[in-house]
Amino acid sequence: DTGVSQNPRHKITKRGQNVTFRCDPISEHNRLYWYRQTLGQGPEFLTYFQNEAQLEKSRLLSDRFSAERPKGSFSTLEIQRTEQGDSAMYLCASSDPINTEAFFGQGTRLTVV
Amino acid sequence: AQSVSQHNHHVILSEAASLELGCNYSYGGTVNLFWYVQYPGQHLQLLLKYFSGDPLVKGIKGFEAEFIKSKFSFNLRKPSVQWSDTAEYFCAVKAGNNRLAFGKGNQVVVIP
């Protein structure tokens, strides 16, 4: 499968713990996006990378959230000191600069208990 | 910031009925418009997109959408739905930046 890959698919964690998610984009795509989706809502933009540079961050991305894309390939999203309100589906997408169509992964569903 | 409105969050219809899902956005400049579909248990997939040119866009699985600039709308249509069209449909807009703004989605259930 050459699509966008996200791991893990599901994560249950206790409040206050740190979690890290990984996204492997389509190999030739230099743009990578993170979105968050809660029940009954559409995906909400979190952050955007072009190659290894993080170019945009949403106000939704509090200081407990950090994202990296160290070599311009895979990306990680870390949430520190998780709260119940962080429970959501975290989506990763990638695109190339010409096509602009974003291809989405299957997401990581986070449940904070 | 751009916003996207989708109405009638839950739609139930019978096979062979026609489907129209409304999408309105708020942004006065040049936009790229998208409809994504999410089948049960699957990831978001692109149905169709509009960048420029003919405002009537045809996508996969018999779907089409019409961009009406004066109405800030990009409504999705399918003349005759099938049970396999049961899914959640999201309208999205990209305007002047690199982020997609999504609507809340339409949950469509097609009854055989």
Image (cartoon, coloured by chain):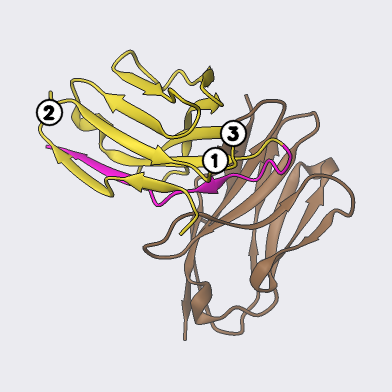
Most extreme residue toward the top is A63
- Please indicate, yes or no, whether residue B108 appears anywhere in the rendered image: no
Q: Mark 1: which amino acid?
A: Ser
The magenta stretch spans residue B78:
no
Earlier along the polypeptide chain: callout 1 or callout 2?
Answer: 2
Q: Please tell me if label 1 and label 2 are on a single chain.
A: yes
Q: Mark 3: which amino acid?
A: Asn
| Chain under callout 3 | A
Earlier along the polypeptide chain: callout 2 or callout 3?
Answer: 2
Total label count?
3
Q: Which residue is mark 3?
A: A30
Q: Which residue is mark 2?
A: A15
Q: Position of residue A94 (x, y in %)?
A: 54, 40
The magenta stretch spans residue A99:
yes
The vertical placement of B62 against A66, above or below, is below
Q: Which residue is mark 1?
A: A94
Q: Position of residue B107 (x, y in %)?
A: 47, 60
For label 2, the crowd category at 10 Å Cα-Cα, with few meaning under 14, some 14 to 19 and many 20 or more, is: some
Q: Secondary structure at mark 2?
A: loop
* Chain coloured yellow in the rendered structure: A
| Residue ID at (24%, 48%) | A10
Q: Is residue B42 left or right of residue B100?
A: left
Earlier along the polypeptide chain: callout 1 or callout 3?
Answer: 3
Chain B shade: brown
The vertical placement of A87 against B44, above or below, is above
For label 1, the crowd category at 10 Å Cα-Cα, with few meaning under 14, some 14 to 19 and many 20 or more, is: many
Q: Position of residue B41 (x, y in %)?
A: 36, 63
| Residue ID at (85%, 53%) | B55
The vertical placement of A38 against B44, above or below, is above
Q: Which residues are magenta?
A: A98-113
Disc 1 and disc 2 in contact, CB within 8 angstroms: no
